[in-house]
Image (cartoon, helix red, strand yellow):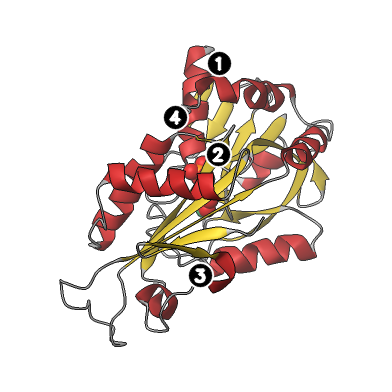
Amino acid sequence: MSRISYVNGRYVAHRDAMVHVEDRGYQFADGVYEVCQVRGGRLVDEERHLQRLVRSLCELRIALPMTLAALGVVLRETIRRNRVRDGLVYLQVTRGVARRDFLFPAPETRPSVVVSARNIDEAKVDRSAGEGIAVVTVPDNRWERVDIKSVSLLPNVLAKEAARAAGAREAWFVDKDGFVTEGGSSNAWIVTRDGTLVTRSADFGILRGVTRGVVLSVIAAQNLAFEERQFSVEEAYGAREAFVTSASQTVMPVVAIDGRPVGNGAPGLVATALRRDFPDYAKVG
Ligand code: PLP
């Protein structure tokens, strides 16, 4: 079956899905995006993703291209046309097409909207979760507004490529004070020796992960010990468990950091339980 993507009002064959050379997303990374999980053909946590999209757009003063209800229809239609059961749907909104100029284009310039969707091999993700993944730490050299989900991802690309070169699956960014901020495409967590879950607070230093938000609900519902604070690389080395969260892999145990085993080097009980319970708390619509 051939893939279909949505590009500025039309559903087109994926191989022909193009944007203009002067699209500001292409020229300046002047745009934002969302990646939502699809489970059983249904969108997971649509509302949280769309609210974050609205926030990202507002922060960059890009107009909402259509109502949220209309965006929801486009997301669902793209999922349907690609027969996605378990997978991901990608939505990107840029400031639109205009003659290349750093300054914002005329206000009537229409934002560009692109949506694509694909199945993912859930069994493969589950196998990874059963084994756990390795991460490596890299300096956080990103701009300060990483709370905006912008398509300006070059530091993340380089960090994840460095992780791959080191035989790891994810990179953890570390700020200038030695504290872990987040992963290249995930939020970072540890479980301390005394069993307390720790993740950095969602200030401007990290993306407010939708999965992170759902995991916070699981933690609250299960009355688990939790602290929202910074943790250093040293503390992570000595943690009992570590894991990352993102829409594409939900809760993924981390079993090695910079080549050192975390805990006993196997996926931890807390991360495994959170992964198991996560679907009960994510909103499927
Ligand atoms: N942090 C970064 C830098 C990301 O790119 C992502 C997801 O792509 C996340 C965190 C996790 O966010 P979410 O749970 O909404 O997928």
Which badge, 1 or 4, comes first in the chain's sequence? Answer: 1
Residue at mark 3: 17
Q: In this view, does 70 lie above or below 1?
A: above
Amino acid type indicated by mark 3: Ala
Which badge, 3 or 4, comes first in the chain's sequence? Answer: 3
Q: Where is residue 176 in the image (x, y as percent from the top left)?
A: 52, 59
Which residue is located at x 47 percent, y 17 percent? Answer: 220
Q: Is mark 2 on a helix, strand or loop?
A: strand
Neighbourhood count class around disc 2 (C-alpha, 10 Å): few under 14, some 14–19, many 20 upward: many
Mark 1 residue CB less than 8 A from any atom of ligand 1: no
Q: In this view, does 242 lie above or below 163?
A: above
Q: Is mark 4 on a helix, strand or loop?
A: loop
Contact between labelled residues 4 and 1, with CB atoms less than 8 Å apart: no
Residue at mark 4: 285
Amino acid type indicated by mark 1: Leu
Residue at mark 1: 224
| Mark 3–mark 1 distance (CA, rounded to whole Å) | 46 Å
Amino acid type indicated by mark 2: Val
| Mark 4–mark 2 distance (CA, rounded to whole Å) | 10 Å
Farthest residue to the front: give it.
1
Amino acid type indicated by mark 4: Gly
Q: Where is residue 96 in the image (x, y as percent from the top left)?
A: 31, 72
Front-lying residue, 144 or 253: 253
Contact between labelled residues 3 and 2, with CB atoms less than 8 Å apart: no
